[in-house]
Image (cartoon, helix red, strand yellow):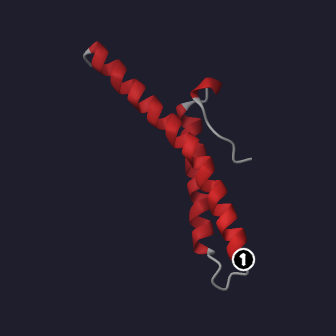
Amino acid sequence: DLGGASDDDGESLARLQARRDALLAQLAALERQQPRGSGLSLAAYQGRRESLVAALEPIYSALDERASTATRSSSATGA
């Protein structure tokens, strides 16, 4: 399950970061297996790459939202 990420599900920052890191590792491994002689078809490569990138997008969105919320909070408190 590649699953998305949202603040609504109460996902912890550490869990979001771990999911991001795991997906990036999968993407890096896929990039090393590019269709050149690996037995991986171009269509399979492109499909898997698209699904990994799509799974990363909501995670980065949630991480960005958390960062901007933390920045707003620290600005409001003068920290």
Going by the image, does 71 lie left or right of 30? left
Secondary structure found at label 1: loop
Residue drawn at (55%, 46%) of the image: 57
Q: How many other residues sit within 10 Å of disc 1, few (<14), some (14-19) or many (≥20)?
A: few
- Residue 24 position within the rendered picture, expressed as x and y whole percent measured from the top left: 56, 56
- Relative depth, front residue between 42 and 30: 42
- Relative depth, front residue between 12 and 39: 39
Residue drawn at (72%, 69%) of the image: 44
- Residue 74 position within the rendered picture, expressed as x and y whole percent measured from the top left: 32, 20
Going by the image, does 38 lie left or right of 79? right
Extreme residue toward the bottom, this view: 37
Residue 48, compared with residue 33, is above or below; it is above
Extreme residue toward the left, this view: 78
Res. 54 in view: yes
- Residue 62 position within the rendered picture, expressed as x and y whole percent measured from the top left: 52, 35
Q: Which amino acid does label 1 sit on?
A: Ser
- Residue 48 position within the rendered picture, expressed as x and y whole percent measured from the top left: 68, 62
Extreme residue toward the top, this view: 77
Residue pointed to by mark 1: 41
Residue 53, compared with residue 34, is above or below; it is above
- Relative depth, front residue between 63 and 12: 63
The number of callouts visible is: 1
- Relative depth, front residue between 27 and 53: 53
Residue drawn at (63%, 75%) of the image: 33
Quarter the C terminus occupies = top left
Q: Write down the quadrant of residue 78 in the picture.
A: top left
Res. 22 in view: no
